[in-house]
Image (cartoon, rainbow, N blue to C red):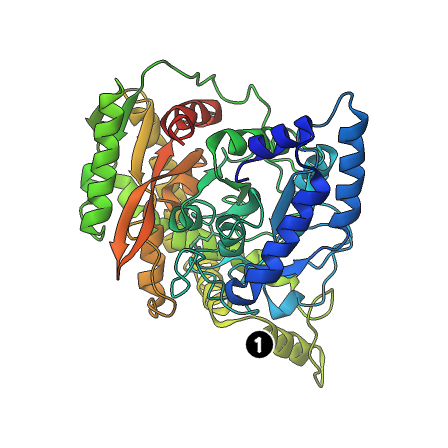
Amino acid sequence: MKTISELKAAFLSGSYTPVQAVEESLAVIANQNGTINAFLAVYEDAKDAAAEATKKYADGGELPPLLGIPFAIKNNILIKGKRATASSKMLENYTATYDATIITRLRDAGAIFIGSTNMDEFAMGGSTENSAFGVTKNPLDITRVPGGSSGGSAAAVAMGAVPVAIGTDTGGSIRQPASYCGLVGYKPTYGAVSRYGLIAMGSSLDQAGPMTNSVADAELVYTIMAGVDVHDATTIRPDTYPAVLPKETYTFGVPRDFMKSGVDADVLDTFEAHLRDLEAAGHTVVDIELPLFEKGLAAYYIVMPAEVSSNLARFDGIRYGYSAEGKNLLEVYEQSRAQGFGAEVKRRILLGTHVLSSGYYDAYYGKAELARKKMREELDEVFKTVDIILTPTAPTPAFKIGEQEDPLSMYSQDIFTVPVNLTGVPALTIPAGYVEREGVSLPVGVQYIAPLGGDARLFHIGKKIYDERL
Ligand code: GLN
């Protein structure tokens, strides 16, 4: 059973129980995790929760919407009493002392947490190769990466261990792995979902969201996680943005210039075929220009490391996390950070510290923030004429483990996803077809981008285009 709705229907009819579902999840993990390495930890107490949920179904009455559904959770999201490592040696032995707001909400809705998933260290990366706990493999082709940074979450769903996993997305980390693993992935409007209890990467960019096998499932999970949170002052109210309503037919804008370089020819063909499908379904597709979006990567790789460098300053070997010996306080700081962080994290801290340093702040950080503001204006203009913007989610299908040695070529995978985080708008990726590499069919995703607060519109079109054809 691949979707939450199928599972729920089976639970309600009594043909299947949460106890069986959790046993099956644990069996899949026991069989496959040795190869895939999607899970860093498996929670045995899921069995108790399953027994309780099974009893509730038997008792009947009013039942919460996710009762008995097994979830996998990216390991940068705090669950009280469980390790929250962010796949870093720095937090290898850190146990969360409280629940993230989204965890509280999902648990209240009946969700069962099966285990924590592997990721790029502190969510920095696009392949899950940057984890301190080994690379995760793509279940569709184990010589390839599952994408990242939420690669463990994507692999957990793609290997059939769970119908849903939660990821976080700072520059594409839900959408790109979803695309590489043939899943639906959702990055909400910034502020729609609380960040309280998430290990921060770039606070003005981070959002948690679902990775699922259907758009309806993503919508259900999003709806439960979303909403104002007193613990996160950046959460938005439902009336923060003007209503963006679903429509019968949509006008889609395609920034063709933006897609000229670096996209694999067959990925582009799959994308174009998807556009023809939309037209055949009565929608309109028009060309648009988004010249500033092309600068998105440059702006992202200044804003994000700046925020990373300040968010990760707290890991000093004193307060919590990995602590190295030193002759004096400075040496404890230096050694703890030198030994606790991996290479990619250090690279970004250095970059971020540099762009924020006096004398460079205006030239880099100030400019990038200005570019970000202009990108929002550019987007507002475009959304006056189109309802939704479409791009491929990533320029290539899943690449080989070890293939992207140069960090800059890895960063270029984020070209279509980072402008979404910089501007705060919501985006949905759905599988749109396959391309072949070395005799293996690999999935390709299409990214749907809506105006701020346009989450409902994305679910509406996504269900029509994807779910109804499942
Ligand atoms: N791949 C991007 C990066 O390395 C996105 C990461 C993310 O969304 N957490 O920064």
Is 2 above or below relative to 382?
below
Residue assigned mark 1: 338
Is 227 above or below relative to 176?
above
Is 313 above or below relative to 422?
below
Toward the viewer: 306 or 158? 158
Side (left or right) of 422 relative to 254: right
**x and y percentages locating residue 224 in the rendered image:** 63, 30
Q: Residues within 10 Å of mark 1 (few under 14, many from 20)?
A: some
**x and y percentages locating residue 33 in the rendered image:** 57, 62
Location of residue 370 by image quarter? top left
> Which quadrant, please, contains the C terminus?
top left
Is 152 above or below relative to 50?
below
Judge whether residue 393 can be spotted in this image: yes
Toward the viewer: 310 or 193? 193
Residue for point 33% across, 63% down: 408
**x and y percentages locating residue 291 in the rendered image:** 24, 39
Residue for point 50% across, 69% down: 346
What count of labels does the image hold?
1
Side (left or right) of 165 relative to 303: right
Residue for point 72% across, 50% down: 79
**x and y percentages locating residue 200 in the rendered image:** 59, 52
> Which quadrant, please, contains the N terminus?
top right
Beta carbon of the mark 1 residue lies under 8 A of ligand 1: no
Toward the viewer: 74 or 353? 74
